[in-house]
Amino acid sequence: MAILDIDDFIGEYTITEDCFNDSSPYIEKYEEQYLVDLLGGELYGLFISDLTPATPQAPQTARFINLFDPFIIDDGNCVYRSEGIRQMLVEFVYFHISRDNAIVKTTTGAAFMENENSTPAPLGAYNVVEAYNEGVQNALTIQWYIQDNSSTYPEENIQNFRYTSGI
């Protein structure tokens, strides 16, 4: 499965890809984890089997395209806005990559990186927590859509997403 590609990480979610930083293990691990939490196991399996074979993958049937693509829906006094599944995954994977790149694994344990010419910014000083929370907001909106259209998604078994304060 490869919904995300390194080219999806642009703008505020740009990540450095070089011989020291490989994003593919993060993409492989967190795509599945967050999609299972988003959809539940059975609906996740159906979603994966609906994806196109070409990379980056996208769904082919309307019920999954409706979740995958961005949407804005007015419902009474509420407006539900989703940037789509791809953007949700970008935000979550970016969070994990950025968080882990701020920490070096050493033989004596985890340590913050030190540089000769600069001091790394603490995690709260840039958009890592904001990226995670935007991913949560997208996930919650997609889950609202699934529940609001439960006859279209009877297989759903969505799991809770929670915002973080970064503390």
Image (cartoon, rainbow, N blue to C red):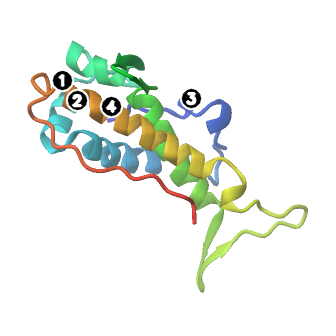
Residue drawn 54% across and 50% down? Answer: 95
Question: Farthest residue toward the bottom?
Answer: 108
What label sits on residue 149 in the rendered view?
1
Residue 73 sits in which quadrant?
top left
Secondary structure found at label 2: helix
Secondary structure found at label 3: helix
What label sits on residue 7 in the rendered view?
3
Q: Amino acid at mark 1?
A: Asn
Could you tell me how far apart the alpha carbons at marks 4 and 3 are, in whole angstroms?
23 Å
Could you tell me how far apart the alpha carbons at marks 4 and 1 are, in whole angstroms?
11 Å
Residue drawn 30% across and 24% down? Answer: 67
- The residue under label 4 is 142
Secondary structure found at label 4: helix
- Left or right of 95 in this view: 38: left
Which sits earlier in the primary sequence, circle 2 or circle 3?
3
Could you tell me how far apart the alpha carbons at marks 1 and 3 are, in whole angstroms?
32 Å
- Residue 62 in the image: above or below residue 88: above
User: Which one is in front, 160 or 9?
Assistant: 160
Marks counted in the figure total 4
